[in-house]
Image: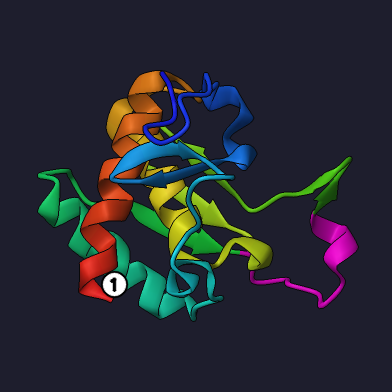
């Protein structure tokens, strides 16, 4: 898989350096729409999850959030990154942690559940497809 603009080889495992928007891009050639990165209230994300699942012909996904949230970001720090969310494939459940209560995180996790894959090329393409569907709805 290569960036459509510059041609650099893209590795889905390095997803923090990629932009998933219709296609998979390197972060030097493309940026996310700021509205995808804004923190959103949990009920709004639940509504988005329902709409996205319907649009992609997927069974509903349950969302949860951390009810014991403490405004201490160190609680979600893991090495060199924040823990944003976790997807449970068997339960079709996404746990969103406060730093990850954003549309782009929801799209990322839904791509895992829709494909049943980790950070693979198939997952990356589905993530890009979901993001491209969400943007015009904003």
Q: How many numbered dots are placed on residues in this image? A: 1
Q: Is residue 18 above or below residue 123?
A: below
Residue 90 in view here? no
Number of other residues with Cα within 10 Å of mark 1, as a class: few under 14, some 14 to 19, many 20 or more: few
Q: Is residue 71 above or below residue 82?
A: below
Residue 127 in view here? yes
Q: Residue tagged by mark 1?
A: 47
Helix, strand, or loop for circle 1?
A: helix
- Picture coordinates of residue 76, whole percent (x, y): 79, 56
Residue ID at (31%, 27%): 115
Helix, strand or loop for the magenta stretch, by majority:
loop
Give the left or right position of residue 80, taking residue 55 as reference.
Answer: right
- Picture coordinates of residue 123, whole percent (x, y): 38, 28
- Is residue 111 located in the magenta-colored stretch of the structure? no
Which quadrant is the N terminus positioned in? top left
Magenta range is 66-76
Q: Is residue 5 above or below residue 76?
A: above
Residue ID at (52%, 25%): 12
Quarter occupied by residue 125: top left
Give the left or right position of residue 56, taking residue 23 as reference.
Answer: left
């Amino acid at each position: 898989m290569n960036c459509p603009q510059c041609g650099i080889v893209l590795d889905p495992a390095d997803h923090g350096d990629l932009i998933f928007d219709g296609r998979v891009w390197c972060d030097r050639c493309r940026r996310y729409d700021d509205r995808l990165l804004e923190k959103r209230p949990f009920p709004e994300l639940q509504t988005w999850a329902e709409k996205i699942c319907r649009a992609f012909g997927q069974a509903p996904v349950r969302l949860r959030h951390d009810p014991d949230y403490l405004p201490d970001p160190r609680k979600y720090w893991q090495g060199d990154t924040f823990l944003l969310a976790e997807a449970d494939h068997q339960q079709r459940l996404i746990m969103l942690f406060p730093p990850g209560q954003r549309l782009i995180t929801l799209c990322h996790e839904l791509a895992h559940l829709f494909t049943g894959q980790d950070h693979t090329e198939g997952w990356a393409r589905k993530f890009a497809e979901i993001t491209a569907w969400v943007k015009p709805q904003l």
